[in-house]
């Protein structure tokens, strides 16, 4: 009986130790998860700070800034128009691109459509972050120039961007914005300008 009791006591202690180890493993996993989350948050914050620094450090003339702003706003119009084309039932509840960006976080359907639209245009979420930062920084003082006016002022906007924008993420985003709009011109021409975007942009002309 003494040996049996001893064995039972050892078994109980082993079970207690096993339970404690499980608790330690759970705590370790929980801490690791929190650490990874905070690391990602800090990295994201650092990237945002770097983007804001890059945007605010831009030194363009007002004319050059208006040209870049025009491409950015037209890309936003393209994206918003395309999302609404895929989600016609949500047209009233998604009046702006900002509403799409907000609601995509909790609405899976909107998120899937948004991601598919970005893919169609060859854009990524990082590009949108950069373009939104640019828009917020300069949107209140910039003016939209339609394509014919832009061509009067500058012939090679790509050179302007690569020469003046040093932050790679911002540079890539602006170059892609230009590509989307310039490529869109060819598409609209080939479709006899039946794109819904053609009806939307004129309201921005001065």
Image (tube, rainbow, N blue to C red):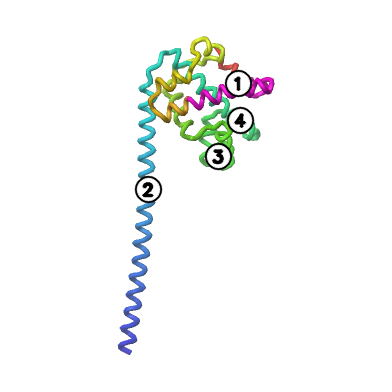
Q: Which of 22 and 43 is in front in this view?
A: 43
The numbered mark, 1 or 2, whose residue comes first in the sequence reads: 2
Q: Which of the image's four quarters has the C terminus?
A: top right
Answer whether labels 4 and 2 touch (C-beta < 8 Å). Answer: no
Q: Residues within 10 Å of mark 4 (few under 14, many from 20)?
A: many
The residue stretch that appears in magenta: 175-198
Q: Residue 152: horizontal and vertical position, in percent?
A: 52, 9
Task: Kindly check if marks 1 and 2 are in contact, taking CB atoms under 8 A apart as contact.
Answer: no
Callout 1: helix, strand or loop?
helix
The Cα–Cα distance between marks 4 and 1, rounded to whole angstroms, is: 15 Å
Residue at x 56%, y 23% (from the top left corner): 181
Q: Does the magenta stretch include residue 67?
A: no
Q: Give the Cα separation between the discs numbered 4 and 2.
A: 35 Å
Closest to the observer, 62 or 30 = 62
User: Which of the marked residues, 4 or 3, is nearer the chain's N terminus?
Assistant: 4
**Inter-mark Cα distance, 4 to 3:** 13 Å
SS class, disc 3 = helix
Q: Distance between the residues labelled 3 and 2?
A: 24 Å
Separation of residues labelled 1 and 2 (CA atoms): 44 Å
**Farthest residue toward the bottom?**
1
> Which residue position holds label 3?
111
């Amino acid at each position: 009986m003494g040996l049996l009791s001893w064995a039972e006591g050892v078994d109980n202690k082993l079970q207690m130790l096993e339970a404690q180890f499980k608790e330690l493993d759970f705590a370790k996993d929980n801490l690791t998860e929190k650490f990874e989350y905070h690391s990602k948050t800090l990295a994201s914050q650092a990237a945002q700070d770097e983007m804001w620094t890059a945007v605010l450090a831009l030194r363009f003339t007002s004319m050059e800034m208006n040209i870049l702003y025009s491409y950015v706003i037209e890309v936003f119009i393209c994206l918003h128009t395309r999302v609404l084309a895929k989600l016609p039932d949500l047209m009233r509840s998604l009046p702006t691109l900002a509403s799409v960006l907000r609601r995509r976080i909790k609405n899976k359907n909107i998120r899937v459509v948004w991601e598919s639209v970005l893919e169609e245009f060859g854009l990524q979420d990082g590009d949108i972050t950069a373009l939104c930062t640019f828009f917020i920084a300069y949107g209140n003082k910039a003016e939209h120039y339609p394509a014919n006016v832009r061509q009067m002022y500058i012939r090679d906007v790509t050179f302007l961007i690569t020469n003046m924008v040093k932050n790679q993420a911002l540079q890539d985003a602006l170059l892609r914005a230009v590509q989307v709009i310039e490529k869109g011109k060819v598409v609209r021409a080939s479709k006899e300008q039946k794109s819904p975007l053609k009806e939307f942009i004129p309201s921005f002309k001065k």
